């Protein structure tokens, strides 16, 4: 009886759509070749995808305050950056459920048209901010009402049935098991995917795959917000969880609320490099824009999380953060150079990914008083220590760490009446962020010295998934400068 009711719901949905969608919205495939599952999957695997909401209207506000002029401006900016696809999220409670209103389906059609005009294909995410998993029949009606105009539309390359479905919710999984074949019956050439939240990660993806064994997805979508220096290991763990199925990175990013824009830029560089090493051809930054105060609906939990307002590649005034140029270069040239790391200390503070370690024992400052080359260097003065730990400046390389690979790091240092210990260190960590070991360089002699090369050569130990480069100076009653760092 259940299968009969579901088939009836599918038939009703298709009939409903055929009567409510104007011919002008059914782009079909009159201007391009009818897509196949294979052609769409090829597009999915290479998509230069951007996640998108306008800076003044996030989540449901994008649709209730629909602004085609602003959307066009934003998507033009994304296309100039190198994007060729955009992810857009739709909401049952906003669009109308179980029958979407003509006004909102027209807005969706207009969005897809704007994206097309800017050279962007579209990935549709359905059923966000929704948990009516017991209502399968109406879920099918709603989904097919939205999707039927785009079954053969080459502008739409994939459908994510639910954003971050809870893999431990048996009712949600049962809903997905029924929705997948119902949608495939109408849209057999449309790739279907699901995501789990970033906290569930690879474990959640593995659980999702095992529970959908009888109704498999076409590909898997990884939401990665972990430590970027361990991105290769995390990506490979997610790939293993869903192997041999295709995996892309559908969301990744770092909020600039509490870190520099330089750290965000380095984050993206490491994730793109890790994905490239792992053979993942599509990485989608979250998100194009920061959000203005009031842009996120006040009745949502997201609106209460300050970090959510600062994930954008662009600020709310439309100006680019450093991360925008890094993502653009990764999309257009594949380049993620070490220069992103500000190894010569010449970048503005906002664009530097260097972080302080144990600043209470002595923080480094960027200064113009003693550069080796360029105009700036890093200076430590009057430092102490905390137990066996010395204060330092630290960063991690763009190149991902793999156990057994050789590494070289160097920097130039000089001192005035220096005391204590001044050295480089490579600190190794496993996939869970647990410290393994460290390798240290030769030390700068105490006293007053000229520029001296400090260097360390090491092999990444077994189990290593990341490395931190530390420029240390502890128990130093004098002054030490660092400049011209290199790591490879």
Image (spheres, grey):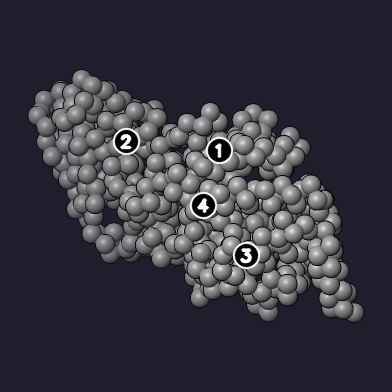
133 horizontally vs 214: left or right: right
> Which is nearer the N-term, disc 1 or disc 4?
1
240 horizontally vs 409: left or right: right
- Residue 228, image x, y percentages: 43, 50
State if disc 4 and disc 2 touch (CB < 8 Å): no
In the rendered image, the vertical position of residue 76 relative to residue 211, given as above or below: above
> Which is nearer the N-term, disc 2 or disc 3?
3
Mark 1–mark 4 Cα distance, whole angstroms, equals 13 Å
Which residue has dot 2 on it? 393
> Which is nearer the N-term, disc 2 or disc 4?
4
The quadrant holding residue 203 is: bottom right
How many residues crowd around disc 4 within 10 Å: few (fewer than 14), some, or many (20 or more)?
some
- Numbered circle sitting on residue 119: 4
Of helix, strand and loop, which one carries label 4? loop
> Which is nearer the N-term, disc 1 or disc 2?
1
Mark 4–mark 3 Cα distance, whole angstroms, equals 17 Å
Mark 2 or 3, closer to the camera: 3
The structure residue drawn at horizontal position 24% and vertical position 35%, both measured from the top left corner, is 344
Mark 1–mark 3 Cα distance, whole angstroms, equals 27 Å
- Residue 126, image x, y percentages: 70, 57
Mark 2–mark 4 Cα distance, whole angstroms, equals 43 Å
State if disc 2 and disc 1 touch (CB < 8 Å): no
**Front residue (pair 46, 451):** 46
Of helix, strand and loop, which one carries label 2? strand
> Which is nearer the N-term, disc 1 or disc 3?
3
In the rendered image, the vertical position of residue 307 relative to residue 461, given as above or below: above
Mark 4 or 3, closer to the camera: 3
- Residue 14, image x, y percentages: 80, 68
Residue 466 at least partly seen: no
Which residue has dot 3 on it? 30
Which residue has dot 1 on it? 73
């Amino acid at each position: 009886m259940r299968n009969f009711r579901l088939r009836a719901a599918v038939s009703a949905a298709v009939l409903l759509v055929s009567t409510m969608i104007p011919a002008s919205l059914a782009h079909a495939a009159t201007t391009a070749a009818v897509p196949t599952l294979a052609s769409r999957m090829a597009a999915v695997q290479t998509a230069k995808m951007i996640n998108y909401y306008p800076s003044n209207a996030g989540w449901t506000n994008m649709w209730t305050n629909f602004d085609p002029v602003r959307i066009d401006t934003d998507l033009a900016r994304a296309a100039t950056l190198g994007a060729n696809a955009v992810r857009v999220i739709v909401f049952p409670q906003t669009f109308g459920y179980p029958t979407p209103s003509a006004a909102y389906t027209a807005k969706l059609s207009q969005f897809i048209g704007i994206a097309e005009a800017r050279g962007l294909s579209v990935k549709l995410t359905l059923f966000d901010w929704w948990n009516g998993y017991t209502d399968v029949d109406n879920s099918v009606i709603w989904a097919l009402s939205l999707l039927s105009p785009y079954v053969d539309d080459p502008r739409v390359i994939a459908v994510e049935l639910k954003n971050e479905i809870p893999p431990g919710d048996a009712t949600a999984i049962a809903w997905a098991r029924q929705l997948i074949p119902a949608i495939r019956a109408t849209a057999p050439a449309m790739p279907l995917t699901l995501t789990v939240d970033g906290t569930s990660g690879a474990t959640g993806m593995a659980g999702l795959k095992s529970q959908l064994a009888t109704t498999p997805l076409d590909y898997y979508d990884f939401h990665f917000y972990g430590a970027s220096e361990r991105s290769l290991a995390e990506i490979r763990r997610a790939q293993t969880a869903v192997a041999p199925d295709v995996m892309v990175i559908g969301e990744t990013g770092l909020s600039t609320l509490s870190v520099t824009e330089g750290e965000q830029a380095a984050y993206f560089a490491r994730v793109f490099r890790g994905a490239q090493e792992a053979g993942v051809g599509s990485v989608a930054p979250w998100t194009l824009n920061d959000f203005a105060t009031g842009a996120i609906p006040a009745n949502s939990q997201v609106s209460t999380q300050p970090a959510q307002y600062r994930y954008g590649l662009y600020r709310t005034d439309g100006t680019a953060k450093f991360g925008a140029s890094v993502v653009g270069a990764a999309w257009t040239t594949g380049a993620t150079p070490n220069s992103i790391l500000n190894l010569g200390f010449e970048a503005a503070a906002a664009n530097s990914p260097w972080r302080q370690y144990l600043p209470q024992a002595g923080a480094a400052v960027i200064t113009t008083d003693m550069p080796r080359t360029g105009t700036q260097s890093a200076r430590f003065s009057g430092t102490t220590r905390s137990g066996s730990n010395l204060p330092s400046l630290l960063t991690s390389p763009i190149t991902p760490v793999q156990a057994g690979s050789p590494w070289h790091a160097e920097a130039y240092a000089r001192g005035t009446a220096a005391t204590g210990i001044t050295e480089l260190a490579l600190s190794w960590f496993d996939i869970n962020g647990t410290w393994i070991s460290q390798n240290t360089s030769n030390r700068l002699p105490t006293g007053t010295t000229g520029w001296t090369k400090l260097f360390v050569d090491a092999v990444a130990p077994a189990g290593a998934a990341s490395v931190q480069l530390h420029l240390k100076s502890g128990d130093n009653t004098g002054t030490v400068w660092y400049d011209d760092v290199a790591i490879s």
